[in-house]
Image (cartoon, grey):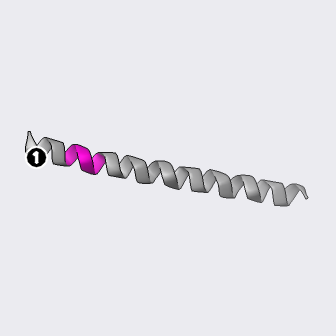
Amino acid sequence: MRERSETVCYVRYTVRYRRVLFVLRRINSYARVAVVLL
């Protein structure tokens, strides 16, 4: 049971990390567009 719960925590952490990376990448692209427009 303990290994299973650790796996669940790992999966949740990975999903959250991927989401954060995706948001950061999107913000970065928006910043580049803003710099080009400015």
**Residue 31 versus residue 8 in the image, above or below:** above
User: Residue 30: within the magenta?
Assistant: yes
Residue at 84%, 59% (x, y): give it: 3
Decide if residue 37 is on the left or right side of residue 23: left
Decide if residue 21 is on the left or right side of residue 15: left
Residue type pointed to by label 1: Val
Magenta residues span 28-32
Q: Which residue is mark 1?
A: 36
Where residue 8 appears, as percent x and y from the top left, is: 75, 57
Residue at 48%, 48% (x, y): give it: 20
Residue at the top extreme, as displayed: 38
Decide if residue 36 is on the left or right side of residue 1: left
Residue at 9%, 44% (x, y): give it: 37
Q: Choose top left, top right, bottom left or bottom right for residue 27.
A: top left
Residue at 50%, 52% (x, y): give it: 19
Where residue 35 appears, as percent x and y from the top left, is: 14, 42
